[in-house]
Amino acid sequence: METGKLAQPDSVHALYSDHHSWLLRWLRSRLGCAHHAADLAHDTFVRVIERRDPEQVREPRAILTTIAKGLLVNHWRRQDIERAYLAALAARGQSLVCSPEQISLVIEALVAVDAMLSTLPDKPRRAFLLAQLDGLTYREIAEELSVSERMVKKYMAATMLHCLKAAAS
């Protein structure tokens, strides 16, 4: 489908009516939650409509499954990040009180940072996290990763550049 061209309502309706119930059951079996399954089914169809003309979809269940699997991974990753953040808040005690809106904004930011860092190779990502989260020195990171201190400096410089490029886009 050309950018900006809307899908034909009849083809969207046919795709949705023929496969929505199946996709919803498939997602519910993996999530165990009807509400999350409904949200992800909706998001799956939106992505199909945005990316291609539904009339041109030859294997609708294959495409729906592929997109839904990606959304499931994102959903589970977000849940992991949210659990970790809420555990960190709880560990800090009751002196730190955040509104639900603040928590939501922080989680969204953490998800975005996680997505950006996930595109880095393993050692640069680990070096960055060891420095930022654990407060290790470059020497300690070098020992942890079995590389030279100079290589850690290269990893950090490359990661910072990566972060700047991601923030600019």
Image: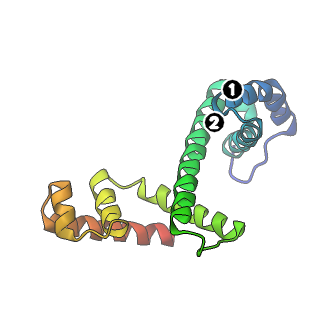
Give the residue displayed 42% in from the left and 72% down from the top. Answer: 164
Within 10 angstroms of label 2, few (less than 14), some, or many (20 or more) residues?
Answer: many
- The image position of residue 87, as x and y in percent, is 53, 58
- The total number of labels drawn is 2
Q: Whole-Å distance between the Cαs marked 1 and 2? A: 9 Å
For this orientation, the residue located farthest to the left is 148
- The image position of residue 77, as x and y in percent, is 54, 47
Name the foreground residue: 47 vs 108: 108
Classify residue 43 by image quadrant.
Answer: top right
- State the mark number for residue 112: none
- The image position of residue 74, as x and y in percent, is 57, 46
Sequence order check: which comes first, mark 1 or mark 2?
Answer: 1
- The image position of residue 6, as x and y in percent, is 79, 47
> On the rendered structure, is 52 left or right of 106?
right
> Does residue 125 lie above or below 169 as drawn?
above
**SS label for mark 1:** helix
Q: Which residue is mark 1?
A: 26
Classify residue 152 by image quadrant.
Answer: bottom left
* Amino acid on which disc 1 is placed: Trp
Within 10 angstroms of label 1, few (less than 14), some, or many (20 or more) residues?
Answer: some
| Residue 89 visible within the image | yes
Give the residue displayed 35% in from the left and 71% down from the top. Answer: 160
* Amino acid on which disc 2 is placed: Ala
For this orientation, the residue located farthest to the bottom is 95
Colour approach in the figure: rainbow
Q: Which residue is mark 2?
A: 68
> Does residue 33 lie above or below 101 as drawn?
above
| Residue 57 visible within the image | no
Whether the residues at callouts 1 and 2 have beta carbons within 8 Å, the answer is: yes
Classify residue 139 by image quadrant.
Answer: bottom left
Name the foreground residue: 39 vs 83: 83
